Image: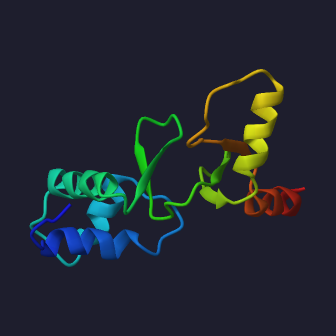
Amino acid sequence: MALKYSRQRQAVWDFIKDREDHPTASVVYEGVRESYPNISLGTVYRNLMLLKEMGRISSVDIGDNAVHFDSNITQHEHFLCRKCGALRDLNTYDMPAAGLHLKAAGFSGRVESYSIIYSGICENCLKKEEEEN
């Protein structure tokens, strides 16, 4: 997909490319606005969706009525802390092994992607709990 260069799109990409916290469009907007004070939330969202369409980022739905964006486009799982809301990447799942498990369970299709979100309490929140007790 050949697109004309856009400073705003580049700013959105620069903001999200090295992040591991899966920001929402609003978080990206607030961050990009520091360099581009006149940018609109709509422009940020359109550029995020365009980057997703281009395959440069992906999105994660954690059921909080917000789209979280992820610059890690490799197939991976996520962990969601139910206390602080932190969403982090995990790389523990083996897609070929999952395919074998599905075949053993009688599934005859082809798995091309997956989305797994583990939930619980993150290390930081567990430490805080221990300190409070």
Is residue 106 shown above or below 89? above
Quadrant housing the C terminus = bottom right
Residue name at image x 20 percent, y 78 percent: 35
Q: Position of residue 28 (x, y in %)?
A: 32, 62
Is residue 57 shown above or below 31? above
Q: Give the image's coloring scheme.
A: rainbow
Q: Position of residue 48 (x, y in %)?
A: 28, 56
Q: Position of residue 75 (x, y in %)?
A: 58, 54
Residue name at image x 79 percent, y 46 percent: 97
Give the side of residue 112 with respect to residue 65, left or right.
right
> Farthest top residue?
106
Which of the 4 image quadrants contains residue 111? Answer: top right
Give the side of residue 86 with respect to residue 133, left or right.
left
Give the side of residue 76 with respect to residue 41, left or right.
right
Which of the 4 image quadrants contains residue 10? Answer: bottom left
Q: Position of residue 23 (x, y in %)?
A: 43, 58
Q: Nearer the viewer, residue 54 or 125?
A: 54
